[in-house]
Image: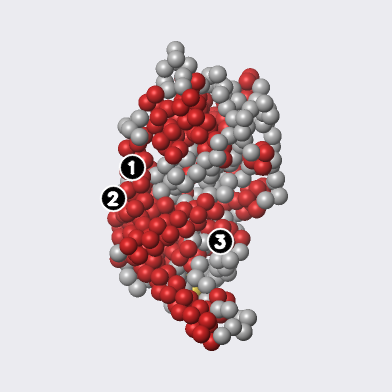
Amino acid sequence: MAARLALLVAFGSALARFCVGQWELPDCTCVVGRRGCEAAAAKEAVTRALRYLRENDCKRSCRRDLGCRDAFFEVQQHMDGCPAGTLASDLEREKYEYDVHCHHCKAAPPGNSSLSSCPNVDCGSESIVEAWSNLKANCEDQEAGGCLSSAQCEEDWLIVYAAMYTCEHFEVHRVIRRGFHEWQRAYCSSGLACSLPQSLLEVDCSTDANVEHQDPYSWIREPDCACLVGPLDCSSERPAIQALEFLRDNECGSKCRYSLSCREAFYHLEQFVDGCPVSAVSANVAHEKHRYDDTCSHCWQQKDEQDSLEDCPAVDCRDEARLSQAWSSLQSCMGDACDTNPQCKQDFQVLSAARATCDHTQMPSVASRGIHSWEEGPCYAQRCNTPLSREVDCATGINARYAGIFSRVSSPSTSMSTDGGSSASGVAIAAVVLACLSCTAWLVTGGYFAYRSLHQEKEKRILNIIQEPGRT
């Protein structure tokens, strides 16, 4: 039992590292340009960007709409990259409404050589949450000086401050991210801060994350589901149902992008719904999956081909106008129109091809949700096969950063020593390799689900610390 627990701890650590790679953020400056922090100009720019987010329904389309993405990046750059108090609190609070719906970028306040260096922070520990809890419990007396009221308050504040700018976005609990700027304004107006590492302040727009986000379309490309959760298996719907039950039971609709286990469950569900034949996916599972489309990160899965179907027409995933027009036109195809009206058939097959070959972010959201109903109902006879639109290579590009430990199993041919050592050492190495493969197989089938429980317990513990300030 102890051995299994040790394996689980190592497994959890590796899974956390997988997520750090997955959430490599671009620099705001590389995507939307450098912005000044003069108060009046910053207020005007952020007000304009927030208006765009509201008027263009960006809570639903932020992860696929370039205008929504850039507007959110504009707000985030001013909020994280300008000194405390630059923006009014109502503007900051409105920005938080889009946090779960939009991709993020990173920005840091200007460097200040007169400040002492920020403390080293263990981004994977609960020390950040404990520091925040102590601030809430002991440092909210403005008359006593707020964050300056004691040495402990100063220490806790600098830990939280450093974590906000040196840790990955997902490593700082969402409660802290939402409350950081407002708490700073209310209880640390003195501007107590520390000097961030120079490497953090130096922006290199040639890194992979920055280059991808400067390309108007590559930033929305999704990783392949097979690189995250293994090959597609359509033999049973039970794993997809279990994933859906987990999403429901753990309220993943509100925390999918921040929860390791919620994301993994959604990847399993999405791979099955998107990749398996319509006949293998029950209507309820397909429709329930769409409840999480706006709040979960997506993966891409090639649709399983069926010999009895004709080929789908070619589709340009970047032609949003054509996809929107096809969906709008399809709404008038009632009854058996898909079988008798060539235009209805064409519109349906264009959308069916787009669903099977394009990333979810490239399809109109209403079409992505609604196409299943047409595939199962009035256009069932007109379903079509989509040719393989891209090769799955888990070792390169976006898959290399997203690929989890589930697919990282070295083959004996690459792991064995080739230096001509003794046969005994070769046998020993082979035994180690086989043992590792056996452990990996166990982790794939059971380790993830056990770690998922550990992660849930950690989330409960963190929330208890936050909700009971000063408990530590």
Left/right placement of residue 198 relative to residue 173 reads: right
- Name the residue at 55% across, 66% down: 394
Task: Say which quadrant the C terminus sits in.
Answer: top left
- Number of numbered callouts drawn: 3
Image coordinates of residue 86 in percent, x first then y, are 59, 22
Mark pair 1, 2: CA separation = 18 Å
Which residue is labeled 1 in the image? 461
Which residue is labeled 2 in the image? 249
Q: Nearer the viewer, residue 354 or 176?
A: 176
- Which residue of the protein is positioned furthest toward the bottom in this rendering? 423
Question: Disc 3 residue type?
Answer: Asn
- Which residue of the protein is positioned furthest toward the top in this rendering? 143
- Name the residue at 34% across, 60% down: 5
- In front: label 1 or label 2: 1
Image coordinates of residue 372 in percent, x first then y, are 39, 59
Which residue is labeled 3 in the image? 399
Mark pair 3, 1: CA separation = 32 Å
Tell which circle, 1 or 2, labels the residue nearer the N-terminal end. Answer: 2
- In front: label 3 or label 1: 1
Task: Say which quadrant the N terminus sits in.
Answer: bottom left
Question: Disc 1 residue type?
Answer: Arg
- Name the residue at 35% across, 55% down: 452
Circle 1 packing at 10 Å, graded few (<14), some (14-19), many (20+), is: few
Whether residue 426 appears in this view of the structure is: yes
Question: Disc 2 residue type?
Answer: Asp
Q: Nearer the viewer, residue 344 or 68?
A: 68
- Name the residue at 52% across, 31% down: 158
Image coordinates of residue 457 in percent, x first then y, are 32, 48
